[in-house]
Image (tube, grey):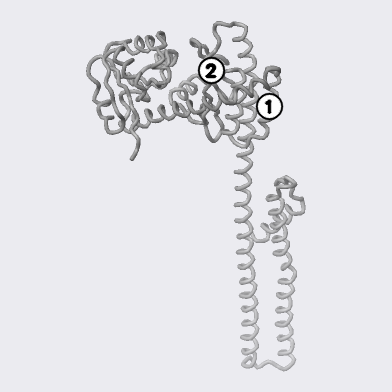
Amino acid sequence: MTKKYGVIVYNPSSISTSIRALKLDFRLTHCQSFESLLTHASFQENDLLLIDCIPEVGSHFVFLDRIKSESRPELESMSVVLLADDLDLEQRLMACELGADDCISTNVSHDDLVTRLQSTIYNAIANKQLKEQLKAASDVAMAAMTNTSDLGANIQFLLESYQCENLDQLGQLLFQSLNYYGLTCSLQMRGEHVTKNMEANGMERTMESRLLNELKNAGRFYDFGCRTVANYGSTSILIKNMPVDDPIRYGVIKDNIFALLQGTDAKVKALDTQTNLHFEHQAQESLTHQLKQGVNDLDAQYRRLTEKIAGVVNQMAGAVESAMQTMLLTDEQEVILLAKLDDGKNNVCDLFEEYASMDDDLKAMVENTASILLSKEDGATVDQLSEDDISKAIEFLKQTG
């Protein structure tokens, strides 16, 4: 049986129809006041706070601001999701600054709403587990990193990024470096073939992903509140805990984070190149296979044609020899005519033998081409085909033209 997670729904009046439909998927608790919310949150039986669609304009943000400003321990470990009519970018940025984990439109389907809420809960659980693991490791790690400079941490990231084989490994390595600066971030890497959104726990958060995608062209840095979006090329991060009260540390972080983004962008492009080379190699293998098959088919057709021509010549010679009996030719004339027929058959055979090597040359050229295209050790390319191979191919096409 699937576990039902507890959800506290805040609405000063009655909960909306879309929220009421969630009773089959979650354990819902309706709260109409902030005091009632604190009471139910203290039981620690709920995993998420859902602010229902409130008709009064701005009421969502007032309530979010109250939750953030009062910093009640009952609410610190609980994710907050805002359900409202479609919000513009500025309003979603405000919701993010006030601590909302996600903003969901009232126009989404029931299944999408359930999926978004479950994803937020799973992220919260994963973050809690990650925090416990990091706390156990941080005491040991901090002792080793005490004497390590910011530049050293960046150089270490660049050295280790060379060994990353995919975007997941690269993202986790970047989060390790960001952890050195004590930063909580969301990451987006945009490759040619895939866009990777991830948190430190390896999962994706929908609201952060949308913000990073919409602000990827907003300049190198885009500040709002204690949050900063940093962009470089194919890489963007959302820093959620910038030290706004420490200008010096604030500037140092920006300088060093930008170097990390440059290294990440370079590795993303390198992975794209590696993927493109893999696709190109597959295409070359397919092309070579088709070329070899075509040559084999052509060889079979050439042999059948040779046999047919030889059969026609032999048939014609037999027919002429039979007809000679009714032509009233002298013995001398018959000998001359038979000699001409033999010369014709011999000439045809000589022509077949002369051009038989052409087929063998073409097959040898194709084999040589295949070995070059499929060579991984030498890194050979099509440009390395010899002029002799190319001229043979052209001559063959002219003759079969």
Say if mark 2 contacts mark 1, CB within 8 Å: no
Residue 366, by quadrant, is: bottom right
Quadrant in which the N terminus is drawn: top left
Horizontal side of 391 relative to 275 (left or right) equals: right
Residue 236: image x %, image y %? 55, 22
Q: Residues within 10 Å of mark 2 (few under 14, many from 20)?
A: some
Q: Relative to the observer, which residue lies in front, 357 or 156?
A: 156
Tell which circle, 2 or 1, labels the residue nearer the N-terminal end. 1
Q: Going 65% across and 79% down the picture, which residue do you hit?
A: 313
Instruction: Note whether residue 84 is visible.
Output: no
Q: Going 61% across and 14% down the picture, which residue do you hit?
A: 253
**Which residue matches tag 2?**
239
- The type of residue carrying mark 2 is Ile
In this rendering, the answer to whether 149 lies above or below 112 is: above
**Which residue matches tag 1?**
158
Residue 266: image x %, image y %? 64, 28
Residue 51, by quadrant, is: top left
Q: Going 42% across and 11% down the picture, which residue do you hit?
A: 71
In this rendering, the answer to whether 209 lies above or below 311 is: above
* Secondary structure type for disc 1: helix
- The type of residue carrying mark 1 is Leu
Horizontal side of 185 relative to 371 (left or right) equals: left
Residue 232: image x %, image y %? 59, 21
Residue 367: image x %, image y %? 70, 58
Q: Going 38% across and 30% down the picture, which residue do you hit?
A: 118
Quadrant in which the C terminus is drawn: bottom right
Q: Which mark is residue 296?
A: none
Q: Relative to the observer, which residue lies in front, 142 or 326?
A: 142
Q: Relative to the observer, which residue lies in front, 53 or 303?
A: 53
In this rendering, the answer to whether 308 lies above or below 291 is: below
Residue 12, by quadrant, is: top left
